[in-house]
Image (cartoon, rainbow, N blue to C red):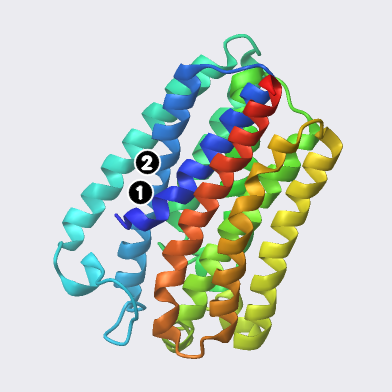
Amino acid sequence: MRPRTLPLALSGTLLGSFLAAYYEYFNWSIFILATITAVSLQLLSNVANDYGDGMKGTDGEERIGPVRATQSGVLSVKSMKTAIGILISVSFLSGLLLIITGTKEAGISYALLFVMLGIGAILSAVKYTVGSNSYGYIGLGDLFVFLWFGLVNVAGTFFLHTNFLDFDVFLPAASLGFLSVGVLNINNLRDRVSDKKAGKKTLVVRIGEVPAKIYQVTLITVAIALTGIFLFRNYFSFIQLLFLVTIPFFVINLNNVVRIKEPKLLDPYLKRLSISTLFFSVTLGLGLILSIYA
């Protein structure tokens, strides 16, 4: 289930909901259903990834990180397929309830749009490593993570609360997308040797270790800069700058990721960046909400 990845799923729905509350819209039903849907999609992606990499032999004996269920034989292939089926069902049902609740005032066209987005999210969660045309094996994982964890999760949650979109919302949404890609990039830096041997052409495998670390610095820097632009455009209270307390965590994480040469030593920094991203979402959101009452 890879629980250390769940902060990323929670970050998007939290930030989207905080932004909606900042715009003076908030619905508890939307927040709860969006959270259930995001977490179930993340779990689906994790299980499908375990299954896909296990079946393709990518998770071999040289793999760094936690033991995988398919690779180790702890769970049978049939059990993994059953888990994937259950999680698809949960994601679909919670997502459908979310769409019905969030678009009842917006109209059928928006409902259909979100149904298509939901189906796309389920397919993307599965197709990252499963099947012959899995996009994670051709270096498109970064793009999909940016879109789904950032733009769609944050802006989509915001819309379901409010039934409208503001351009400014896409700035913190993109920030979260870049931070999420940063987590994936650390994962791919850690696994670059085994991925290359298995023919998994992640972006790290394609561009190499040093460019991938420069890319990591760029992702985190741009993420913080976009949030800075958002607050510059909406600034009226110093409390809105609360998110700045997260900057040292990102700097320390970056420093270690850039400095470390041994791939296996990168593993702890994946979880730390994931948690820092959640902390970023919470502090940014709380700063916005508290500024209303300052």
Residue at (46%, 67%) from the top-left corner? 270
Residue at (31%, 87%) from the top-left corner? 62
Looking at this rendering, what residue extends furthest in the top direction?
Answer: 105
Looking at this rendering, what residue extends furthest in the right direction?
Answer: 233
Q: Nearer the viewer, residue 40 or 79?
A: 40
- Amino acid type at circle 1 is Leu
Location of residue 1 (image quadrant):
bottom left
Vertical position of residue 159 compared to residue 282: above or below: above
**Viewer can see residue 144:** no
Question: Could you give the CA–CA distance between mark 2 and mark 1, rounded to whole angstroms?
Answer: 5 Å
Q: Which of the labelled discs sits on residue 30, or is there none?
A: none
Labels 2 and 1 touching (C-beta < 8 A): yes
Q: Give the SS element for disc 1.
A: helix
Tell me residue 9's x, y (percent). 47, 45
All told, the count of numbered labels is 2
Residue at (61%, 75%) from the top-left corner? 203
- Amino acid type at circle 2 is Ser
Judged left or right of residue 232, residue 114 is left
Alpha-carbon neighbours of circle 1 within 10 Å: few (<14), some, or many (≥20)? many
Please give the residue where the numbered disc 2 appears in the rendered image: 40
Q: Nearer the viewer, residue 224 or 135?
A: 224
Judged left or right of residue 76, residue 292 is right
Tell me residue 234's x, y (percent). 82, 33
Tell me residue 269's x, y (percent). 46, 70
Vertical position of residue 29 compared to residue 149: above or below: above
Location of residue 77 (image quadrant):
bottom left
**Viewer can see residue 184:** yes
Please give the residue where the numbered disc 1 appears in the rendered image: 43
